[in-house]
Amino acid sequence: MDETHLLRIITSYFKESIFENHKKNVLKNHSRLKSYKINPIIVKYLSKVLEDDFTSLGIAKALYFPRVLGTSINTSFGTRIQNMFVELGLAEGSLIKGMDIEFVDKLDHRKKWCQLKSGPNTINSEDVNPLLNKFSTVANLARTNAIDLNNNDLILGILYGDESEISQHYRKINQKHPVIIGKEFWHRLTGFPDFYEKLVQELDLLIINLDTEDFFKQGYIALAKEIDESDLFNFS
């Protein structure tokens, strides 16, 4: 598959499986009151912060904004990209517990076992040792089964960002196993040295021209209506 074709397919995947899917989930799930666990004290305070009043619209925004703008799409992002790599034949789903994908590195032509992360600051200090333990387990399993594998074949791949942005937690992992981020990761995966920059440009163009159909506002208005009709709050 040539670079232009792969760029087109991946850009289309982002539109349909990430952006459009986010829109569907917002309207189907996140605009429904039953999908939230509510702390009545906090949401009243947040309503006051957002609307300078205790209103159904303020409550709706307090619940809806963090879910839709943060949690819902960020949680699914890495999983969807992982699935995309497998569907497009860029990688295989790993059969080894703790690894996300396996692929042949286009630079050194060795098989890599890879744990995927979205960005350069997506783990905490308590995540470091469990990740290192996963790599150690794979290395021990490889030795037991006489698999040709060294420490550099067990990698942590970060989908976006630059090496200068990598957190200290990732740098600790990098002392034992390569942490490969952004441009280099996509190069090793696809074989195209400038693929990452070109993909970012294509996605920027896609997003600028995306028709949102005002779904975001539709969602919190629908949620506010449900809040108005519920018995959870008294706005009188």
Image: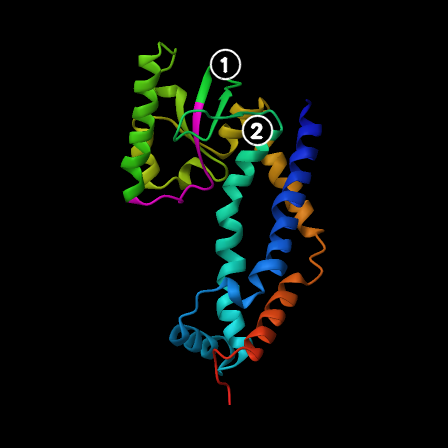
From the top left corner, tell me how far across and down residue 162 is, in percent. 46, 38
- On the image, which quarter does residue 30 sit in? bottom right
Across the whole image, how many numbered discs are drawn on residues?
A: 2
Residue sitting at x 44%, y 65%: 37
From the top left corner, tell me how far across and down residue 221 is, in percent. 62, 71
Describe the colour scheme in one phrase.
rainbow
Judge left or right: residue 158 versus residue 186.
left
Of pointers 1 and 2, the one earlier in the residue sequence: 2
Gap between marks 1 and 2 measured at Cα = 18 Å
Looking at the image, residue 45 lies above or below residue 120 = below
From the top left corner, tell me how far across and down residue 38 is, in percent. 43, 69
Q: Nearer the viewer, residue 144 or 62?
A: 144
Judge left or right: residue 28 versus residue 71.
right
Q: Magenta segment, which residues?
A: 113-125
State the residue position of label 1. 109
Mark 1 and mark 2 residues within 8 Å of each other at the beta carbon: no
Looking at the image, residue 215 lies above or below residue 74 = below
Q: Is residue 25 magenta?
A: no
From the top left corner, tell me how far across and down residue 73 is, in percent. 53, 51
- Crowding at dot 2, Cα within 10 Å, few <14 / some 14-19 / many 20+, comes out as some
Looking at the image, residue 102 lies above or below residue 167 = above
Residue sitting at x 28%, y 43%: 126
Residue sitting at x 49%, y 82%: 52
Judge left or right: residue 164 versus residue 183.
left
State the residue position of label 2. 86
Q: Is residue 123 magenta?
A: yes
Q: Secondary structure at mark 2?
A: helix
Looking at the image, residue 205 lies above or below residue 147 = below
Q: Amino acid at mark 2?
A: Val
Q: Nearer the viewer, mark 1 or mark 2?
A: 2
